[in-house]
Image (cartoon, rainbow, N blue to C red):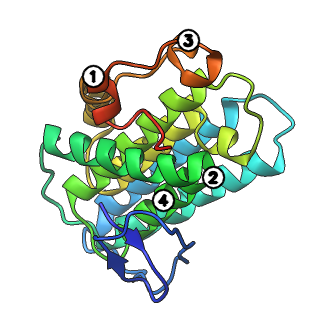
Amino acid sequence: MALASDGGKADSNHPVGLKRSRMSGASTSNPKGGLSGWVIVAVVGAALFVIAQCSGTPKSDQQVAAASFTSETSKAIASVAPAAVEPLEMTSVRAAAKDFKAVYGAQQLPGAMIFSQNCFEGLAHEFSWSRLDECGAFDAIAVGRLDAEADTTSSEYTYFDQEIAAGRYLAAVSSAGESADNSDLRLEDLHAKVAVAAPAPTPAAMPDQGTEPAPADAAEEGWEASA
């Protein structure tokens, strides 16, 4: 998974040094067309409804921004995604774990949020199921890190809220052509694979809590920030 740089291009050799990309240039025509297009819109709308309800009312500006981002990226993905659905592969999850290790080690959760946004926006320009799953896995890994940092209150905390992140992935998967039921199953499979490839740390195992660091295998899969 590579970061989008200025001009919408990605440099796969430099996972850090993040720059915020902008959604642009996605075709508004839907190659699926007709009834299937309306089905996608309905499914995305349902996913956004879940996001809107997850944190109660009234909604903060951060919650509104997160829901708006999901809506924009999902519509853009629907306009370019191929009809054929490909299976979720463990290689996508492991790639996401390596990206998270690099990004989080350099810039913590703010950098992780920018990386995630670039990842989802990039799907509107060059879609692939493996890339979509990398985006979703990256978010799931960040959710685990955020849960370990229980006192975090920021825009990153809202963006990586468990239900918001899940809704973002579900909306993207549905927009790409997956059915609602299979989208839920894909999310479950994603979380199961993330739990294997990048198990979430516990607060007691975090170095800044004054305890022994996590095992070396956990560090290898992207949980320990670099010194």
Q: CA distance from mark 3 to mark 2?
A: 25 Å
Q: On residue 211, which mark appears?
A: 3
Question: Who is closer to the viewer here, 223 or 129?
Answer: 223
* Residue 43 visible somewhere in the drawing: no
Q: Nearer the viewer, mark 3 or mark 4?
A: 3
Image point 44% across, 34% down: which residue?
224
Judging from the image, what secondary structure is the residue with disc 3 in?
loop
Q: Earlier in the sequence, mark 3 or mark 2?
A: 2
* Labels 3 & 1 near each other (Cβ < 8 A): no
Q: Is residue 90 left or right of residue 5?
A: left
Q: Residues within 10 Å of mark 1 (few under 14, many from 20)?
A: few
CB of mark 2 within 8 Å of CB of mark 1? no
Q: Residue at x 30, y 46 (%)?
A: 98
> How far apart are the two marked residues, 3 and 1, measured between alpha carbons?
27 Å
**What amino acid type should be assigned to the residue bearing mark 1?**
Ala
Residue at image mark 2: 110
For label 4, the residue is: 115
Disc with the residue nearer the chain's start (2 vs 1): 2
Rendering coords of residue 192 (x, y %): 27, 22
